[in-house]
Amino acid sequence: MDIYRVDTMTDLVRGNAYVGRGIVIGKTADGTKAAVAYFIMGRSENSRNRVFVEQGDEVVIHPFDASKVEDPSLIIYSPIKTWENHLIVTNGDQTDTVYDFLRAGNTFEEALETREFEPDAPNFTPRISGMLTFHDMDFSYKMSILKSADAVGSACNRYTFAYAATAGVGHFIHTYVCDGNPLPTFQGEPERVSIPNDIDLFTKEIWENLDEQNKISIYVRYIDLQTGAVENRMINKNQ
């Protein structure tokens, strides 16, 4: 068994109808850039009625057709925010929780101790989160998943993973293993994935291999570790 195996995003999402929402964080193969990707998928009309919108450094999810919004609480949020030398990316309004805790001088872990999985029984969708911390022209990153301890949502288990950024390697965490009813929650450690140097190649690799019927939006950001220059790519199926 090769515990240091690194797959491609093609390997990890192609042919899987529903991995849900996903976060990828890592460093490009040439070691010069930090890479972050976030995508959303949806099965219901309410979930599919969304688009990503850029607001400065922040990314916000808006309804594509406001007249069709059934329940905004779990579908409208800011998946990406920055605070000082931190970049936060999550699959829900815990982005704001982490942001507020950092501003108050607290930690990523302390913020997520106050949150738990989503109240969408019987799926109990896990909250997945990531944070990059930049320092000395490099960075480290953390990933978290908050998920139900059992099939009835009686308690929340919290897992945090901390990584040193390694050239060419990233980690991929997503909400579900695959499609199902109820949806099976992601299990184990975030998956090791290769990070190419080209942001367009990376964006295309993820987007084109996500299930055509269920994919909704993707946002990818590359940050030059020496200059701080930022490149963003965004695709909305609804636009």
Image (tube, rainbow, N blue to C red):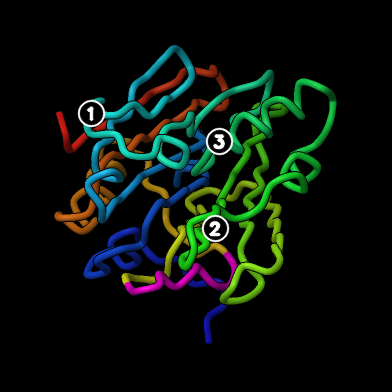
Q: Is residue 204 above or below residue 136?
A: below
Q: Quarter holding the C terminus?
A: top left
Classify mark 3: helix, strand or loop. loop
Classify mark 2: helix, strand or loop. loop
Q: Is residue 22 above or below residue 191?
A: above
Distance from disc 1 to disc 2, alpha carbons, whole Å, reads: 24 Å
Q: Amino acid at mark 1?
A: Phe
Q: Quadrant of residue 183?
A: bottom left
In this figure, which residue is indicated by the disc labeled 1? 64
Distance from disc 3 to disc 2, alpha carbons, whole Å, reads: 12 Å
Give the mark nearer the N terminus: 3 vs 2. 3
Q: Amino acid at mark 2?
A: Pro
Is any part of residue 86 visible from this angle? yes
For the point 44% across and 59% down, the residue is: 193
For the point 40% across and 39% down, the residue is: 75
Q: Quadrant of residue 130?
A: top right
Relative horizontal placement of residue 16, taking residue 78 as reference (left or right)? left
In this figure, which residue is indicated by the disc labeled 3? 93
Magenta stretch holds residue 79: no
For the point 62% across and 51% down, the residue is: 143
Classify mark 1: helix, strand or loop. loop
Distance from disc 3 to disc 1, alpha carbons, whole Å, reads: 19 Å
Relative depth, front residue between 165 and 213 = 213
The residue segment tinted magenta is 180-189
Is any part of residue 233 visible from this angle? no
Relative horizontal placement of residue 89, taking residue 215 as reference (left or right)? right
For the point 36% across and 44% down, the residue is: 39
In this view, the residue farthest toward the bottom is 1
In this figure, which residue is indicated by the disc labeled 2? 126
Q: Amino acid at mark 3?
A: Asp
- What is the crowding at mark 3: few (fewer than 14 residues within 10 Å), some, or many (at least 20)? some
